[in-house]
Amino acid sequence: MQLFYLLVIAVLVVYIVFLHLQIVRKNVFIDSTVKRITGIEKNWKMDELLKFLEEIKKLSYYTSFFNDKLFEEESLSFILKNVSDSKIYIHYTKDEVDAKSIITNGFRFAESFYKTAMPVSDDKLDLIIKHNSRKYFGDYLIIICISDRIIERYSSELEDSGISSSSVENILTEAQPERNENSDMVYLLPVQFIKGFINLRTGEIITNPDFNPGYSSPRFTENVRMIKES
């Protein structure tokens, strides 16, 4: 019986040491993660980012945040390919039907483009943070891409016309804006600015054959004129 008690005590001691090591490991990892996210290690290459994500996956506490395919190399490359000369935005939607409609018909938004479209850059840690705050809005990630040249051109036209009440995204539409049931103005960003979408569960990438981030329409300048005269 005495031997049994000694074995029980030995098992408990080993278990306590194991728990202590796990707590220390998590504390070290959390401290490392905080330092990385707050900017100490932002200028990572792709392989460094993927290595960091693998570290996170090893801890079961974090696995629920990484059950999608956004952080696979192919997905990241698709999102950020035009980042050097374009503004990139992401939008989440729950239904594949809606995602397909957007790459076919354009992106509809009410009042402010930035209510549902979130800007991203090649700061991949920033993308992780933004994704974890929005991913519950849906499994289909719409990628919107507008050339810097287009942004600069029509921002200048707004400024030259003395218009400060409208953002450049509000004039990048070929459809007449209309009010919805809440009396908000609804705009339609042309399909040419929709790069495609990613199924975050499967990793499937659907591209838009009409994608053209440098698309320019005479209607955009006309929209500026109409706002100025209104």
Image (spheres, rainbow, N blue to C red):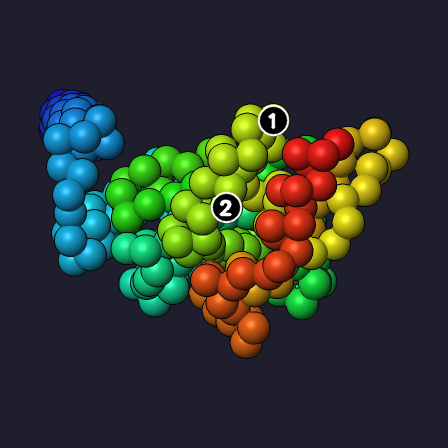
Nearest the eye: 96 or 9: 96
Residue on which the image places disc 1: 165
In the rendered view of the protein, which quadrant contains the N terminus?
top left
For residue 58, side relative to residue 198 (left or right)? left
User: Which mark sits nearer the N-terminus, 2 or 1?
Assistant: 2
Q: x and y percent of residue 111 in the render? A: 68, 33
- Quote the CA–CA distance across marks 2 and 1: 14 Å
Q: Say above or below: 220 vs 211.
A: above
What residue type is disc 1 on?
Ser
What residue type is disc 2 on?
Tyr
Q: Say above or below: 22 vs 105.
A: above
Nearest the eye: 67 or 125: 125
Q: Secondary structure at mark 1?
A: loop
| Residue appearing at x 83%, y 29% in the figure | 182
**Where residue 154 is drawn, which disc sits there?**
2
Q: Is residue 51 visible in the rendered structure shown here?
A: no
- Quarter holding residue 74: bottom left
Q: Residue furthest bottom?
A: 209
| Residue appearing at x 56%, y 43% in the figure | 169
Q: Say above or below: 158 vs 144.
A: above
Q: Say above or below: 194 vs 170.
A: below
Q: Residue furthest right?
A: 181
